[in-house]
Each structure stands twice: as structure tokens, then as C-alpha cells.
Image (cartoon, grey):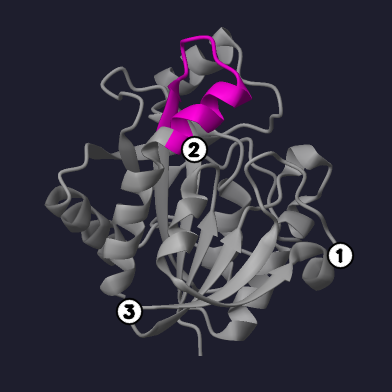
Amino acid sequence: MTKTALILGTGWNQVIKQIKVIKRTPYEKLFKLKSTVPGHQGELIEAEYAGKQVAIMSGRFHIYEGYTAQQVTKPLLYLKKLGVKNLIITNAVGGLNPKLKVGDFVILNDFFTLMAPTPLVGPEFIDLSQAFNLQLIKLAQIQAKKLNLRHSLGVYAYCHGPQFETPADKRALKILGADVVGMSNAPETIMANYLKMKVLGLACVTNLAFVKHSHQEVLAESKKAASNMTKLLTAILKQL
């Protein structure tokens, strides 16, 4: 049984080099869907680390690729069948909080669903008062501190994309209380909670939201932070 799964966002896939890969399966074969975003490999990896089985989604689907919220979260249903209890969701984000710097890690403790298309249909009433698991948050904080990585707790705001947010969008999100903003994570977090998984959200600040930027720059900053991303993920995995 695979207890833990990772969803690797932009820049986070270097962790694959530190684990024992057992099997790779393209998303197209499993889900009949293709990941089209640069930096997202688009394959499910079954692996072993520290004597434990781990499932890794190397890359993800986004709604801005033309997929529905149900399609974006289809892999989570597969992970559930594998027996996954702990889900670590990672992504690259823009920093809205002025205290954040490029390269900082934000351990998510809440998120906005106001603009996030839900993968749930019908009277699927679930409690999201603690969408990110408190025990996993604490674990991530301890490991980040041990590794001497700049980190903080923060609130994530989802925006559809693929366009980056306008200055007005960013000002509004900041006023509402968002610390970081990105184009993924929210539909998956909703579905994972519905499936009774414990969720840990890890974000790496790859750009400052109020500074003009491009996807190429986001990829470049993700590459710079890849070593720290890998250290943090492997430290957490050892404890699960």
C-alpha cells in the first residue's frame, strides 16, 4: 500500500533524482489526458524512499489547459485506490505578502475557494475549516527550521490563468488576506479533503507578484530553488 503521494509543481521535480524509481507511467496512458505546460513532465511515478512506497505525480493538469475541475483531479481518485492517506501538494507561487522574498517557502494553512472551480458535483458538503492538516503543517515547519530554510505560514489564492494576475487583482487579493497566488492547487485540495486525505501544501515563491514577470523567469527561479525544494521534501518524507 502506498501511504504518501506527492504532486510536483513547477520546479519541484528534482526530488525524483533522490529516490528509487520503480515504475513510470505517462498520464496519457492512465488518464487519457496530456500535461501541456513547460516544466511538467506528465507521468505518474511509483517509487521507494527511506523504505517506504511513494506515488509521485510529476507535473499536473491545470484548468487553463482546457480541462474541467473533474479532469484536473482525476489522478487523485487513482491515488485513493493506491491507498494514499497523506498528500503533499507543491507549486510555484507569486508572493503577495511584502515580507516574502523569492526563494522563500510558504507552508499553506488556508486557501481561497472563491474563484476555484470545484471538482465536486451535487450536495457534496465537506468541511474545509482545516483543509491543510495541522500535524503535517507542524512537521513541515520543524523540518524547514532544521534545514535553515526561510519559511512562513500563509494563505493561498487560486487564479484561473494562464494570464498572470493584473495589478488590480493582486491588490484585491492582498486586501482579502492572501499571502501567495498561483494557478493550481485549489481543486486538488478540495478533492483530497473529499477523499479524506491529509493534505500538506508547500509553495515556493518564484516571483514577487507586484513585479513584472514571465513564465520563463518563474522556471528559472524554480531551478535555483530546486535543491532546497528537494531537501525539504525528502526530510518530510522520512518522517511519514
Pick whichever, 16 or 134, lies toward us. 16
Name the quadrant containing residue 62: top right
Mark on residue 92? 2
Q: Quadrant of residue 32?
A: bottom right
Q: Mark 1 points at which residue?
A: 32
59 left or right of 205 in image: right
What residue does disc 3 label?
A: 50
103 part of magenta stretch? no
Q: Which of marks 2 and 3 is nearer the N terminus?
A: 3
- Crowd rating for badge 2 (residues with CA inside 10 Å; few <14, some 14–19, many 20+): many
Residue 164 in the image: above or below residue 35: above
Q: Which residue is painted at 54% across and 22% down in the image? A: 217
Task: Provide residue 149's location: percent of width, then percent of height.
Answer: 21, 42
- Specify whether residue 182 is in view: yes
Span colored in magenta: 205-223
> Which of pointers 1 and 3 indicates the residue nearer the eye?
3
Question: Which numbered disc flags the more N-terminal residue, 1 or 3?
Answer: 1
Residue 76 in the image: state x and y as whole percent.
63, 68
**What's the CA distance linking mark 2 and mark 1?**
25 Å
Residue 221 at x, y percent in the picture:
45, 29
Helix, strand or loop at disc 2?
strand
The kind of secondary structure element at disc 3 is loop
Nearer to the camera, 112 or 228: 228
Tell me which amino acid carries mark 3: Ala
Closer to viewer: mark 2 or mark 3: 3
Which residue in the rendered view is the most extreme toward the bottom?
1
